[in-house]
Amino acid sequence: DTFIQTSSAEQVYYLPQYLCEICHVITERLRKENRARVGIPILYRAIELLRREPGQLLSIHSDLYQLCLLCQWFEPALTYLETDIIDINRENGKFDVKHLLLSYYYGGMIYACIKQFDRAANFFENVITAPATATSAIAVEAYKKYVLVKLISGTIPTNHLPTYTSRNVQQTIKSLCSTQYTELFNLFNNGTLTQFDEFVNRHRDQYARDRNLGLIKQTRNAFICNSIQQLTKTFLTVSLKDLANRVQLQSTNEAEKYLIDMIENGQIFASINKKDGMVIFHGSPERFDANNMLAKLQDETEKRMQAEKQLKELERQISLSKAYIQRTQQSSPYHDRPKILN
């Protein structure tokens, strides 16, 4: 602790691997001693010493995220998670890809904890789709949570994995996770609440071992919300009793509770006439010239422009790198031809 707090960036610049190794040891010790919160300021200081630009990833980012998860203190981790990664500090050749996968895996778990499920799914997807000749245990666990947060977020894709996922990863996931997790996609598309509950109860022990029971509970709520949303495509009006029967809820009071929550969250647009027990579904009232919509468009445009700027800079750096120039020269059709001497 004293060494890290008193060090300067100039002192550790050329030997980052040693400071990172110290941080790995500190993290493991604090984890075992259940004192995760103590290590967060230490790791935060180490990252600030070592990273050379805001978008650079270090192996100790994964240590910081792990400790933040253990003590449920997410703000220090979010400081870095909100910044897009555009570079990796190779730590003089000592950087292990394991830390890249763990950074995204723990990051996905943090976003799931604060209920930013779209962002969580994106982080888990980065773990699953990382280039690999063999499937890591981290990727398998990431896929399990990827399925659940994807469903909770309201996204029900027909293709369970992006097409650019490694074939080895796809095959391993199919053999290890198909029964308990991938099948949930099919249930969301075609199943009933009774079938969902039976399926979950059948595999509850596996979900408990995976420590995913909390996400499973939220997935059940998402299943009910999805079933109600499907009714808005079929009916303009429906009685609370009929809605409860179609969604397989236990009572009209439970149906009303879900409807009120969904209306407040903007998931559906509806009104409830308590006098006659009817639900009236409405179209979206959102105006696309509203100030908040304009602000969203401006924010997204700025993000795209920044991403394009970063990509151009990366392209420039690659085109000037010695390794790239050598490779392009070797692939040139003129590379192996004899030189013509004057």
Image (cartoon, rainbow, N blue to C red):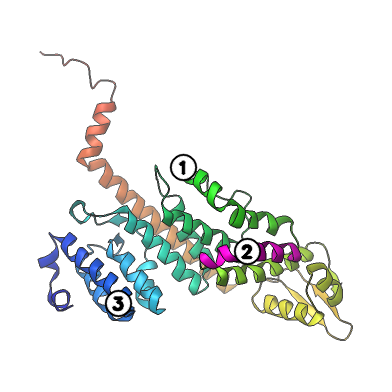
Vertical placement of 273 versus 225: above or below? below
Per the image, the residue denoted by label 2 is 154
Residue toward you, 289 or 328: 328
Q: Which of the 4 quarters of the picture holds residue 44? A: bottom left
Looking at the figure, which quarter contains the C terminus? top left
Looking at the figure, which quarter contains the N terminus? bottom left
Left or right of residue 140, residue 314 in this image? left
Per the image, the residue denoted by label 3 is 40
Binning the other alpha carbons within 10 Å of mark 2 as few (below 14), some (14 to 19) or many (20 upward) gives some
Residue 195 colored in magenta in the image: yes
The kind of residue tagged 3 is Ile
Residues at badges 2 and 1 in contact (C-beta under 8 Å)? no
Q: Which residues are magenta?
A: 193-209
Binning the other alpha carbons within 10 Å of mark 3 as few (below 14), some (14 to 19) or many (20 upward) gives many
Q: Main secondary structure of the magenta part?
A: helix
- The CA span between labels 2 and 1 is 28 Å
Q: Residue 79: x and y, percent?
A: 35, 72
